[in-house]
Image (spheres, grey):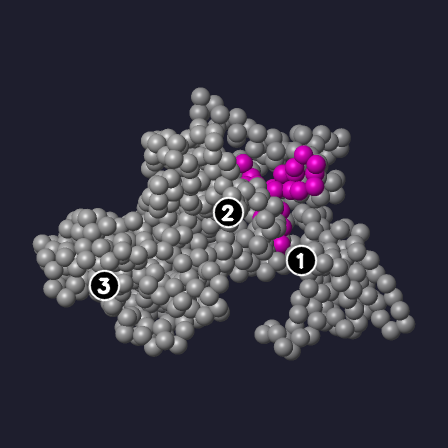
Amino acid sequence: MIERNNKNIQAQKVLDWREYLSIMDNQQFFSLMHLYIGEVKTPYNKQNLIEQLSSFIRKEENQNLIFNMLSENDIIILNAIYFISDVTQEKLSSFFSGTFNFAILYEILLNLEERLLIFKKFDADHKTNYYKINPLLEKKLLSILNISNLLQTPETKDSSTIIENTNKFQLTPLFLASIYSLINLNPDLCKLDGTFKKKIENSICNIFPSIADSKFLIQIITSLKNLSLVIQNDNYLEINHERWKSFSNLTFTEQYIYLAISHNAKLTQNDLQKKAILLSTIIDNISESGFTKNTLYKCAYLINEKLSNENFSFTTSSRLSSILNRETNQTSKSFTDDVSSIINDAINFGILIHFSQDINNEPIYKVSKNFCDLQTSFNSEKVLTIDSGFNVSILPEINLSSVLEIINFMELKRFDTILQMEITKKSCIKSFDLKETPETICAKLEKYCNHQLPQNLIISIEDWYENYLSAQIYHGYVLKVSETKKILIENNPEIAPHIKTILAPGIYLLDFTDSEQAQNVIEKSQLDFIGNVRNTQNQISLLPFQKFSCVKNLFELIQNQENPNLQINNELIQELKNHLSTMELTKEQYEDLLNRINRKIVITKTQLRKETVKVEKIEAFGMDFSGKIHVIENAISSKSFIEISYEANNLPEGKQVILGTPISLSKDINDTYVEILVEPEKTQKTLSLASALSVKKIRGAILNG
C-alpha cells in the first residue's frame, strides 16, 4: 500500500513538471528545446517534445553531467527547496536573508531552472508558484539532499581556543526559591520602575555574593511578573502561591525556558506555549560544534516548518502542529523578529553561550553545559540540616516543588552554592496565614532533614503558633446564617471543607480565592436559601502552566547521511570552452555561448549551436544614456527584472544596487526616470537614469537573455 502511494506521488510530480513545460510561452519553450534536444521540426507536438526532453534527462550520462556541475550554492538552494514545504521565492528570501541578497538568490533560482534542476508549480488560482525539485532528477540528487547542508557546522579559527564561558550565572531550583523567599518576606523591595529600593540594593550583595550585577535579579523578577508568578499590586509585590505550585510541577528545563522567553513581555498562553516549544526544539537540535546566529535562525525556520507540517508524524505532532499553525498569516518579518527575540533570550539567560568565533569572526553559540547538566532529575530526600540557632542549610539537589514546601516558614539569609535560611517567628507567622500549623511544619522538616529536629525548635514553633491564634486579622469571604441553618452549613459536603474558622455562632470565614469560586460552591451546595455573593467582581482565572514536548534530533528523523565529496567538473567546462574556440562565430555568438557554459546550462558539445543565440543588449553603463533606456524598454516588454546601481560612498562596496521590475519610463528636460517595483520590499520608487552607474536586465525567463 505504501509503495503504491509513493508511486502515485512520484507520478503526480512528473505530471506537475510536464504541465510546467506545457504552459510555458512558446518563445521560452522552443529556446529550451533548441538548447537540449536540437532543432525542432515542423509540424511539432508539444507533448512529444516534452517526452524527448524527458528522455534526455533520464539518460544516466546526462544526469551525471548535470550532477557534477553543482556548486556549493546550488546544493544549498536545492536543499532549501526540498526541505521547506510550499517554498516560494519570498520564503527562500526570508530563509536566506543573512546569506544571499535578493539579486543573487534570484539569479541562482533562474540558473537552476534553466539547468532543469527545479521547476515552478502554480497554485489553483495561478497567483502563487512554488519551487519543486525536478522529479526526473530527484533520485540522483538524494545523496546531496541533507539537512546539514542548510545547518552547516561553522569553521572555527582555532579549535584549541574553544573555551566555554562559565561566568554566566545559571538558574537553579534553589536560586528560584531564594527569589521566591526574598519577595515573600519583602513585598515592597522594588520601586514602581522595577528597580530595587536602596535598602534592598545594599543587602543584595550579601544575600547573593555570586551575582555581580543586581540587574540579573531584576530581569528574573520581571520574568516572574510576566508569568503571573508574582503580582504587582501598586507599590508592592505578591507571591501567587497557586501559580507557583503549577509552575513547580514542570521539569526544570521547562521552567528555565518559560522564564527565558518571558522577560521581555507578558505573552498570551498561546504565544508562551508556541515560543517555549520552538526554543526547546532549537536547543535539542543544535550540533555539538555549535551554530552561528544566522544558522540558528535557519534552524528555527526549519523546525517551525517541520512541526507545522501535519504529514510529519511524531508522538505529539498534532498538538504541536495545532499550536504552531495558529496565526498562519504571520509575516516573515514577524517570525524573524520572534526568533531573534527567542535566541537573544536564550543567550541572556545562559542557555546558549558564545564559545568561539568562525572564520568570518561571527560568534558561535552552543548549548551551555550547565544547562544540560540541569536537565537531570533532582534528588529531594534528606537535603537540609538545622542547627540549634534554627539556621537551615539546603543542598542544591532539591527540586523546586520540594523546596517550595519548606521555605514559606523560613527567612532568606544567603544564596551561594547552598541556600542558607533561618526559621524565625516572622517567617512562621506568614506561613500560618497559609494554613500551616506546628504539626505540618515539623512534618515537612522531618521529611527533608537528615537528622532529628532540635527540640527547642519544635517548642518555639508551638509558642509562635499559640501567640498567632491569640489575635488575628481576617480578610476573605464571610457567610452568616441564622441559628436554625447552622447545622445545614456545617454538614454540607460542598461548603464544610471551605470553612477556615468559625468567627461566632452562625458566622463562618471561608477560604474562597475569588467570588467565582464562592458562587460555584454555593450552587453545588444546593442550599437555595443562600443568595449571590455580595459585591461580586469578575476576576481573571489563569490557566495552569502546560508541559511541552520537543523532538530531539528532529533532523536525523528526516535524513542522516554523509554528503558525497562533490567538485565541479572543471575538466568538462574547459573541454567545452576549447570546442567553442574552434567554432566560426561572431563576437556576440561566442560571448553568448561562453556565458551559457559558465552558467552550466551547456553540458554536451552538441548543445553549442550558434543558431540558438539571440543577440540582445542587456547592460549599459555610465554615459550610454540611450543604451540604458533600451535595456529598460526591453525589460518592460519581457517583464524581466532590472538591476540599477548608483554611487554610494557610505556603503562598503561604494555603490547601492537596486533590483526590481520596471513599470514605466518618464522624461523631462534634464533626465529620464524609471518607475520600478523594488524587490523584495514590493515598494514603488522613481529612479534617475542619468545618475545611474549601470543598468542591467536580469533574465526573467529561461534563456531570455
Q: Decide which of 236, 617 is in the foreground and name it.
A: 236
State the SS at label 1.
loop
Q: Mark 3: which amino acid?
A: Thr
User: Label 3 vs label 1: CA separation?
Assistant: 64 Å
Q: Mark 2: which amino acid?
A: Gln
Residue placed under numbered mark 1 in the picture = 681
Residue 173 in sight from this viewpoint = no
Mark 3 residue crowding within 10 angstroms, few (<14) / some (14–19) / many (20+)? some
User: Label 2 vs label 1: CA separation?
Assistant: 45 Å
Q: Are marks 2 and 3 in contact (CB under 8 Å)?
A: no
User: Relative to 291, is 397 on the left or the right?
Assistant: left
In this rendering, the answer to whether 160 lies above or below 346 is: below
Residue placed under numbered mark 3 in the picture = 424
Quarter of the image for residue 154 reads: bottom left
Residue lying at 48% horizontally and 63% vertically, measured from the top left = 234
Among numbered discs 2 and 3, the one appearing first in the sequence: 3
User: Relative to 455, is 585 on the left or the right?
Assistant: right
State the SS at label 3.
loop
Q: Which stretch appears magenta?
A: 106-135
User: Relative to 155, is 91 on the left or the right?
Assistant: right
Q: How many numbered marks, from 0 up?
A: 3
Q: Is residue 128 rendered magenta in the image?
A: yes
Mark 2 residue crowding within 10 angstroms, few (<14) / some (14–19) / many (20+)? few
